[in-house]
Amino acid sequence: GEKRREKIKALGSQRVEVSERVAARLGKKAEILAKISDETVSIEDLNTLIEQAEEVKMDKNTIDDAKYILKIKTEKAVIDKFKTANGAKDIATIQNLLKDHVDEPGQGDIVRLPSRILENSRRIVAAVAAED
């Protein structure tokens, strides 16, 4: 009877361990989800959160949503940079932005710029080139 009691006790503590692990994993998932959903989350943090979400095997929809939010935030950040550079008629910055995001975009980071901003940027660069 003693051995059986020990076995049952051991099984019980194993169950506790497993449920703590499950709870920790669920807690981690909930934490990641809350951070992804936070509108103030930075692009850098979002990248990290996507990696963490993939590590803890969160559902594909959540990860896809996070990637979509990242894409939108990245586009907005780039568009804001263009607007600022165009407003300041900062040629060097405009040329670099055009090169990085339009002329030779990297894999998966092709930003869809509104044509108005793109045309403006090209016009400003062309106008300066014509002056030289």
Image (spheres, rainbow, N blue to C red):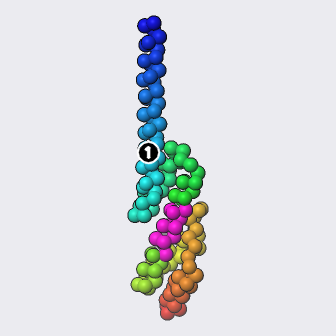
- Name the residue rendered at 45%, 48% in the picture: 30
Q: Is residue 32 left or right of residue 57?
A: left
Residue 129 visible in the current orientation: no
Q: Visible in this render: residue 87?
A: yes
* On screen, residue 43 above or below 116: above
Q: Is residue 13 above or below residue 43?
A: above
Q: Start and end of the magenta stretch?
A: 68-79
Which residue: 51% across, 63% down?
69
Residue at the front extreme?
1
Give how far across and how far down residue 21 sits, in percent.
45, 34
Residue sitting farthest toward the top: 1
**Quarter where residue 122 is shown:** bottom right
Q: Residue at x 53, y 47 (%)?
A: 58
Between 129 and 30, the one nearer to me in the picture:
30
Residue found at the very far bottom of the displayed protein: 131
| Image coordinates for residue 52, horizontal then vertical, percent | 48, 48
Q: Nearer the viewer, residue 77 or 21?
A: 21
User: x and y percent of residue 44 in the render?
Assistant: 44, 59
Secondary structure of the residue carrying numbered label 1: helix
Residue type indicated by callout 1: Lys
Q: Is residue 110 above or below residue 124?
A: above
Instruction: Verify whether residue 128 appears in magenta.
Output: no
Quarter holding the N terminus? top left
**Dominant SS in magenta:** helix
Classify mark 1: residues with Cα within 10 Å, few (<14), some (14-19) or many (20+): some
Residue at label 1? Answer: 28
* 106 or 37: nearer the viewer: 37
Give the image quarter of residue 12: top left
Residue 76 within the segment the image draws in magenta: yes
Image vertical order of residue 59 relative to residue 12, above or below? below
